[in-house]
Each structure stands twice: as structure tokens, then as C-alpha cells.
Image (spheres, grey):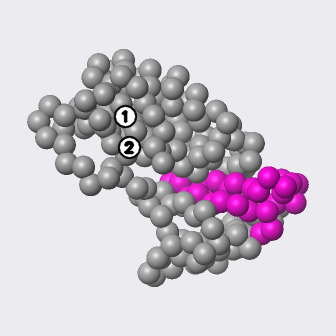
């Protein structure tokens, strides 16, 4: 098995490509070792000294290291853990998977009428134009909500994009410009907690 690695715009995160599907339908993020018990792979990666976060995309694993860790130490151990996992055939998630965090969507907001159409258009643009580019950098972007009164779209960055020095610029210069161009009702894009 050959696993490629790619740098991401976030210097604390590396993208690992095992050459097969990782989590094709739902991305998952693990921020602590306690959450990682939901996944044999995430748990093995958190057992590597210096791993501070794990994100599963469709065909990649993004690993974020702690500030004091060195990639020259973390990377070979992470590669070994990923290889061991895929060679073993173990499932990505344990049966109950209580700690796995799939994408959090909007906050139980029901949109109606014209606002529902605007939200549908925003979600479609994010899914087709933004998410693939963000996934290429080892992360994900989640629609949280749209405020029809102000025109502000709230999005959450995950994986390599969460905490990335360039994530604010990605939201403002990239995503905001795209959404404002195609959806005139959008006035701004803000990061959601």
C-alpha cells in the first residue's frame, strides 16, 4: 500500500491519501482522544504523540499536529497507523460511534418561501464549487445558517481549514465573492462557531 502525503495551507496539518475511500458519504472530525474512541483509525492516530486533530474526508485523512510536535516524528508514525488500519480491514467507525462528529448543519432553522430558495442556491454552490476546493486542501466547509435580514451567510470550516491562517481570507475573498456574485441577496460571509 502506498500512501501519499500533501501539505495543506495550514502548516500544522498534513493530508494523507491512502489511495482508497476513507469516508465517502460523511466527513468526520475528531478533536480529542476521547472523541477518537468512536473510530479505530482516529484512536490509533491520537496514540501518536503530537497528534492534535484528525479529519476524515472522502478519500483522505487530515492530521493536525500540536504546536510543539515535529512532522519528522509525527508523519512516519501516522503513516504506519493509517497503513495498519487499511491493511487490517478494520471499520472506520466503531459500531455505536458516540464520539464521531459528522458535519453539523444549520441550527434547526426552517426556511420558507424566497428565503428557502436562496438557501438552496447557497447550499448548491457550496456543494459544487466550494467544498471540492476546500477538500483539496484537506478540509471541509459546512453551511450553518443564512440571516435573510442582513444577508449574512454563516459557515464553519473543518479539518485542515479549521484554524488555518488563511481560512479567514478563504471565507472573505473566495467564498464571499462567489456567493455574492451568484446570489445577490448575500451581503457577507462570516465564520460560525
Asked if the magenta segment contains residue 132, the reply would be no
Image height check: is 59 above or below 191?
Answer: below
For disc 1, the neighbor class at 10 Å (few under 14, some 14 to 19, many from 20) is many
For disc 2, the neighbor class at 10 Å (few under 14, some 14 to 19, many from 20) is many
Determine the secondary structure under disc 1: strand
Task: Look at 52% across and 35% down and name the residue there.
Answer: 133
* Residue 114, x across and y down, in percent: 14, 31
* Residue 22, x across and y down, in percent: 54, 61
Asked if the magenta segment contains residue 51, the reply would be yes
Q: Residue under circle 1?
A: 153
Q: Which mark is residue 4?
A: none
Determine the secondary structure under disc 2: strand
Residue interval drawn in magenta: 48-74
Q: Quadrant of residue 3?
A: bottom right
Q: Quadrant of the N terminus?
A: bottom right
The front one of 152 and 183 is 152
Left or right, 33 with respect to 78, comes to left
Left or right, 99 with respect to 51, comes to left
Image height check: is 125 above or below 34?
Answer: above
Q: Which mark is residue 143?
A: 2
The front one of 67 and 14 is 67
Image height check: is 27 above or below 46?
Answer: above
* Residue 126, x across and y down, in percent: 39, 36
Amino acid at each position: 500500500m502506498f500512501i501519499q502525503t500533501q501539505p495543506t495551507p495550514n502548516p500544522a496539518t498534513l493530508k494523507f491519501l491512502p489511495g482508497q475511500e476513507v469516508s465517502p458519504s460523511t466527513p468526520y472530525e475528531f478533536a480529542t482522544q476521547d472523541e477518537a474512541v468512536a473510530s479505530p483509525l482516529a484512536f490509533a492516530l491520537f496514540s501518536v504523540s503530537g497528534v492534535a486533530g484528525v479529519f476524515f474526508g472522502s478519500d483522505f485523512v487530515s492530521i493536525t499536529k500540536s504546536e510543539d510536535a515535529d512532522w519528522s516524528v509525527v508523519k512516519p508514525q501516522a503513516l504506519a497507523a493509517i497503513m495498519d488500519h487499511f491493511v487490517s480491514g478494520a471499520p472506520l467507525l466503531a459500531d455505536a460511534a458516540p464520539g464521531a462528529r459528522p458535519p453539523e448543519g444549520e441550527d434547526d432553522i426552517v426556511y420558507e418561501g424566497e428565503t428557502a430558495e436562496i438557501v438552496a442556491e447557497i447550499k448548491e454552490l457550496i456543494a459544487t464549487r466550494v467544498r471540492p476546493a476546500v477538500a483539496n486542501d484537506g478540509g471541509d466547509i459546512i453551511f450553518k445558517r443564512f440571516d435573510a435580514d442582513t444577508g449574512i451567510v454563516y459557515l464553519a470550516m473543518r479539518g485542515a481549514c479549521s484554524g488555518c491562517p488563511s481560512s479567514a481570507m478563504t471565507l472573505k475573498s473566495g467564498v464571499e465573492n462567489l456567493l455574492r456574485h451568484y446570489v445577490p441577496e448575500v451581503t457577507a460571509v462570516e465564520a460560525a462557531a
